[in-house]
């Protein structure tokens, strides 16, 4: 338990060991590029104004070389900065992703986190890249270049250096701070407007039938338009802030140059020094001005990092024992006694369920959606903790074992099985890394997937989100995985879900054949063939409302008989 | 929108031109040609540039929001009709209407002004340089085209490389999301911890591949940067030498030094905004392709496409399985034909050889269905899934038009009726009713101007009053997106209350209202349906015995291939 707690409790660190060195290198390259740009103009200004005094050519030769050298090196340093910066950023992102994953592993099923939220979370890890490439590196490089420019001017005229420093601070610190604060404030106002627009659009799309049938389309449409108008108004306000930052940056730059020239003139500096001061001041703003936009992005980056840190701080789904016991080798007897499971502070999802699974027993669980069927399986797999009651493995409290060990014995086909972007073979093999090709083929035959493998082959890459996989194929792939893994207690959560009825019945029949003699807990809403299982448990609202063999349940009025009748009625 | 865009571009170009004036004044002061007093007009020019920069940003923002609004205003009405093509891509559409259009920002606020500036300023600079110093002007004029030429050249030679690596990059980049999504599956098979090291390996491979691409991709910006800075050196050094020989005055030399970089900056700015801008254009293309309407109704299928040429409907309480038949006694309610507020009596409905085929499907969704429903009759439609039960209701609702056959309402062809007059005569509860992100009350009174009392009466009739009262704000409780804070049974009863809220409706269409409900919810919904169907012509698609019991007559839809199976 302690190991788990510290692992997930560690805030997501930004930089892995060895990274600071690379970061310094990238910063130096960036600063060098900025400085070369400033030095190029300063040297050119010096050369031209000095040449106007018509000295011997030798006096200019150093400046001429400098101008050419700075012109060449600026581009090369910039190239180096961009490459090393992206390298650092990609390393940091990889580290963040790995730590995010480590933090997610013990959190158990993420309730109400749809695929969309999940991809937004993954996008958040991109924020680390933005933080480095678009915020931190340019800011550090600008700081170094700006300091160098101020020091250079200080040698010529300290008061001008003071003016330049002031101007750079306003443009490089005050303005970005302002845009960051404004971005935070505006996104706090814009986010709800965006959400509202999304909700209105979702209503229009998903509720199209209801709206059409009830003649409420125009009403919903105008609600959508209003939401759009509100969002547009806020966005206009936000763009005014950004525009002000843009204008102010130009203003500060120009006025600083004017002030520097004025200071040089009143200090009676010669033409050469004045020109160098003026042009250095003008150009030293170039690395600083983009920081306004960086400030705006910085606010978004901070929000993303905060969200990631919250995930890192999510407590693990189940408490792990400090000194876990070793599970016995022999097939266990699992006893569930008065089990109560609650998600958050809602009504209990399971409310006093008892069940005994001796080796070789097959038990089916039936019930309407929301009855607690999947919760029961999750409790057995130790991905949710229970509030009261107990689960015992051969008489020992399940909480005395490590959850990973429990899942090595009690697992199977879970809700929402997932197809990875990998070959069919690799998708299967994750449930049996050591399995031979024959084992794979056997599992595939048992899951009635062999027709598909014959057609598409074993090495076809399955598409993103399993888009090349139909619902039925997905379900059978998941079933093949569960059979390949061959746990001591096999859990099957609606194995015939999303399969057409004919196949569902055939699949269930094969399944009941394949699981004969195997300890099995089967959640299903297809009832044909259930006369073969030892016991059927009907769950409603987290409680057992009926239990017994198929024949007894069909004879008594209730949910099971109703379901059986409608299944007979709709059978092809 | 257009005036905003014009103002934005004008401000950008004017600010660019003011840079020329600023260079002129600064060169004058530094060369000693102008007095220190000229610093005042210089400050004013700077202030004007700041102001124009602000204006550019404001008008760019206005342009962007106006265009996005305009696109949304044309997109949203496209979602109105229940259209299979639209609903299949619903998630995509919701994203497109929101964040998807934001990709246009980069194009409108960054790229377009940059193009305008790049089109004007370099020419203005070159013209000014021609007047000031011919030699410099020629150098700038000759090197300037190198930027777009090199840009295109590098882009062209690297495209092959990047294209090659693109697929690998996308695959590696998507790996993390893939693993996170599949975490529950990995956990179930004890592979979750092992995968952490795989993530590390893949990330390292991703970085190596990306850096290989970037090394080439950044070459283009290296070339552009080098062209710009070397051109400056190319200008500055000869200018210095000519100053030395006295063939050029200091003012011109400083002016040249200040102006020359300004010729290159706009072209580079255009290059840096190009990539982001093109993503925006892609988003706009997607939006435009949706705005252009596609045929929403099934296309007509010739009669010869299937051999099924006879009606696939048998009216058959006698054919029901035993336990159901016992309950399915015919129960005829004398229909109350004159409920107040009604313009019509409940109509009789006749389907005559109705065939529906959705575009892109091989099978007919409905196959030559002939069915006669008397006024005020309650008919339950049963049959295996996928046989077209829901499609039957959708035909009556006018969501789909039959490709063959016709539907007669009291003898009048449905195709000839005005849907806006026909639909108010219907009350429809779909299989998965959509609850809107609005109050319970607004969800019940959808499309009608029912008073709060009428809403309450409807809710009570739908057996919904009890749980609505228990909600934190009763009828004024805001429901989450898609009614997230209600259970399936509760959502179904709110949808029934919606139907009750139209006392004038004469036809009731229910699509499996009790599928997957628990026993208590089912009993409540059945009881509500019983009351709702009184005095109305009702077509109820049903699975469960309790609902089928309600019907005066049970109609079984058959799949042709298996007519005799049940």
Image (tube, rainbow, N blue to C red):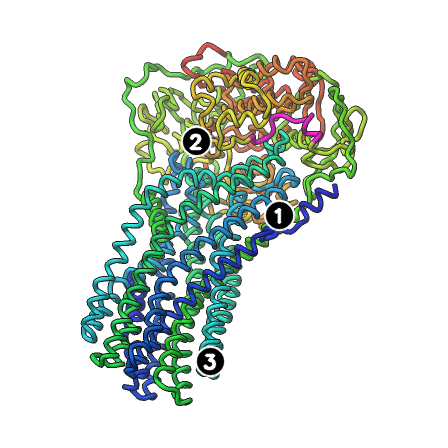
Per the image, the residue denoted by label 2 is B346
Q: Are marks 1 and 2 on the same chain?
A: no
Span colored in magenta: A405-417
Q: Provide residue B456's location: percent of width, then percent of height.
A: 58, 44
Q: Position of residue A360 (x, y in %)?
A: 71, 16
Check the residue under mark 1 and report the chain it is in.
Answer: A
| Picture layout, residue B138 above or below residue B429 | below
Left or right: where does residue A187 sit relative to residue B369?
right
Residue B33 against residue B345 in the figure, above or below: below
Kindly identify which residue carries mark 3: A155
Q: Quadrant of the N terminus of chain A?
A: top right
Dots 1 and 2: beta carbons under 8 Å? no
Dot 2 lies on which element? loop
Residue B18 occupies quadrant? bottom left
C-beta proximity under 8 Å, tags 2 and 3:
no
Question: Which residue is under mark 1?
Answer: A311
């Amino acid at each position: 338990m302690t190991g788990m707690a510290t692992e997930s409790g560690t805030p997501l660190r930004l930089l892995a060991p060895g990274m600071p060195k690379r970061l310094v290198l990238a910063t130096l390259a960036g600063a060098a590029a900025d400085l070369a740009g400033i030095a190029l103009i300063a040297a050119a200004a010096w050369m031209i104004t000095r040449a106007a005094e018509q000295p011997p050519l030798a006096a200019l030769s150093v400046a001429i070389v400098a101008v050419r050298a700075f012109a060449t090196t600026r581009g090369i340093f910039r190239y180096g900065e961009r490459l090393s910066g992206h390298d650092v950023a990609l390393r940091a992102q990889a580290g963040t992703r790995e730590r995010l994953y480590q933090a997610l592993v013990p959190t158990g099923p993420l309730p109400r986190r749809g695929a969309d939220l999940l991809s937004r979370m993954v996008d958040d890890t991109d924020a680390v890249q933005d933080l480095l490439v678009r915020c931190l590196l340019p800011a550090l490089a600008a700081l170094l270049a700006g300091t160098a420019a101020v020091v250079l001017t200080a040698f010529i005229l300290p008061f001008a250096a003071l003016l330049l420093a002031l101007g750079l601070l306003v443009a490089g610190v005050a303005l970005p701070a302002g845009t960051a604060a404004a971005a935070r404030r505006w996104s706090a106002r814009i986010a709800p407007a965006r959400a509202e627009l999304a909700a209105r659009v979702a209503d229009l799309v998903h509720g199209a039938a209801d709206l059409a049938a009830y003649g409420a389309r125009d009403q919903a449409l105008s609600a959508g338009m209003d939401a759009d108008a509100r969002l547009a108004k806020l966005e206009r306000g936000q763009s005014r802030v950004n525009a002000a930052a843009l204008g102010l940056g130009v203003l500060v730059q120009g006025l600083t140059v004017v002030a520097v020239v004025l200071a040089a003139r009143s200090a009676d500096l010669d033409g050469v020094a004045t020109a160098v001061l003026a042009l250095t001041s003008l150009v030293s703003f170039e690395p600083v001005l983009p920081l306004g936009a960086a400030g705006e992005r910085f606010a978004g980056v901070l929000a993303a990092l905060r969200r990631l840190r919250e995930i890192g701080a999510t407590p693990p789904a189940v408490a792990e024992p400090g000194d876990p016991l070793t599970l016995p080798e022999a097939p266990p007897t699992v006893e569930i006694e008065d089990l109560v499971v609650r998600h958050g502070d809602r009504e209990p999802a399971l409310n006093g369920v008892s069940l005994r699974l001796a080796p070789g027993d097959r038990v089916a669980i039936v019930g309407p959606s929301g009855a607690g069927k999947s919760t029961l399986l999750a409790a057995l797999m130790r991905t949710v903790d229970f509030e009261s009651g107990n689960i015992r493995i051969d008489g020992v409290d399940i909480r005395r074992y490590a959850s990973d060990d429990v899942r090595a014995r009690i697992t199977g086909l879970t809700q929402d099985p997932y197809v990875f972007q990998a070959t069919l073979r690799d998708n299967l093999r994750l449930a049996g890394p050591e399995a031979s090709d024959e084992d794979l083929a056997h599992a595939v035959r048992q899951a009635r997937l062999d027709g598909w493998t014959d057609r598409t082959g074993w090495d076809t890459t399955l598409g993103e989100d399993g888009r090349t996989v139909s619902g039925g194929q997905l379900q059978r792939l998941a079933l093949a995985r569960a059979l390949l893994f061959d746990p001591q207690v096999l859990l099957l959560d609606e194995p015939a879900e999303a399969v057409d009825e004919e196949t569902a019945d055939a699949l269930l029949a094969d399944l009941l054949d394949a699981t004969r003699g195997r300890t099995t807990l089967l959640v299903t809403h297809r009832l044909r063939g259930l006369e073969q299982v030892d016991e059927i448990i009907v769950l409603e609202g987290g409680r057992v409302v009926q239990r017994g063999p198929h024949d007894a349940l069909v004879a008594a009025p209730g949910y099971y008989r109703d379901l059986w009748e409608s299944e007979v009625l709709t059978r092809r | 929108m257009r005036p905003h865009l014009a103002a934005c571009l004008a401000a950008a170009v004017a600010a660019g031109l003011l840079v020329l004036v600023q260079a002129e004044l600064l060169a004058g002061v530094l060369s000693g040609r102008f007095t220190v007093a000229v610093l005042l007009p210089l400050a004013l020019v700077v202030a004007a540039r700041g102001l124009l920069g602000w204006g550019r940003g404001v008008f760019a923002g206005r342009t962007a929001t106006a265009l996005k609004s305009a696109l949304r205003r044309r997109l949203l009405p496209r979602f109105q009709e229940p259209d299979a093509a639209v609903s299949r891509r619903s998630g995509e559409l919701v994203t497109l209407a929101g964040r998807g259009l934001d990709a246009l920002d980069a194009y409108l606020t960054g790229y377009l002004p940059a193009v305008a500036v790049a089109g004007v300023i370099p020419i203005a600079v070159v013209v000014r340089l021609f007047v000031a110093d011919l030699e410099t002007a020629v150098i700038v004029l000759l090197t300037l085209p190198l930027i777009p030429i090199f840009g295109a050249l590098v882009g062209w030679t690297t495209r092959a490389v990047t294209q090659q690596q693109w697929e690998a990059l996308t695959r590696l980049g998507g790996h993390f999301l893939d693993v996170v999504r599949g975490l529950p599956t990995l956990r179930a098979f004890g592979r979750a911890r092992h995968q952490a090291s795989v993530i590390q390996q893949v990330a390292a491979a991703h970085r190596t591949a990306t850096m290989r691409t970037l090394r080439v991709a950044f070459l283009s910006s290296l070339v552009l940067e080098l062209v710009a800075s070397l051109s400056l050196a190319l200008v500055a050094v000869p200018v210095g030498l000519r100053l030395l020989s006295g063939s050029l005055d200091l003012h011109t030399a400083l002016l040249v030094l200040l102006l020359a970089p300004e010729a290159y900056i706009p072209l580079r700015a255009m290059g840096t905004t190009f990539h982001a801008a093109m993503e925006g254009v892609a988003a706009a293309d997607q939006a435009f392709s949706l705005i252009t309407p596609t045929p929403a109704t099934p296309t007509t299928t010739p009669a010869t496409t299937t051999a099924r040429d006879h009606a696939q409907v048998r009216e058959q309480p006698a054919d029901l399985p035993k336990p159901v038949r016992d309950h399915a006694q015919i129960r005829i309610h004398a229909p109350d034909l004159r409920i107040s507020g009604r313009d019509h009596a409940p109509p009789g409905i006749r389907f005559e050889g109705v065939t529906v085929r959705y575009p892109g499907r091989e099978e007919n969704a409905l196959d030559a269905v002939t069915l006669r429903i008397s006024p005020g009759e309650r008919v339950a439609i049963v049959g295996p899934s996928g046989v077209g039960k829901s499609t039957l209701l959708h035909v009556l609702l006018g969501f789909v038009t039959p490709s063959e056959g016709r539907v007669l309402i009291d003898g009048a062809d449905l195709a000839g009726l005005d849907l806006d007059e026909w639909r108010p005569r219907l009350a429809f509860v779909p299989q998965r009713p959509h609850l809107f992100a609005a109050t319970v009350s607004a969800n019940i009174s959808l499309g009608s101007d029912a008073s709060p009392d009428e809403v309450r009466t409807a809710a009570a009739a739908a057996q919904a009053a009890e749980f609505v009262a228990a909600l934190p704000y009763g009828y004024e409780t805001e429901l989450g997106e898609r009614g997230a804070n209600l259970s399936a049974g509760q959502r179904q009863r709110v949808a029934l209350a919606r139907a009750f809220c139209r006392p004038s409706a004469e036809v009731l269409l229910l699509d499996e209202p009790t599928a997957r409900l628990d026993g208590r919810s089912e009993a409540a919904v059945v009881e509500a349906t019983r009351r709702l169907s009184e005095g109305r012509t009702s077509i109820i698609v049903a699975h469960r015995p309790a609902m089928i019991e309600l019907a005066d007559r049970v109609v079984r839809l058959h799949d042709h291939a298996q007519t005799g199976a049940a």
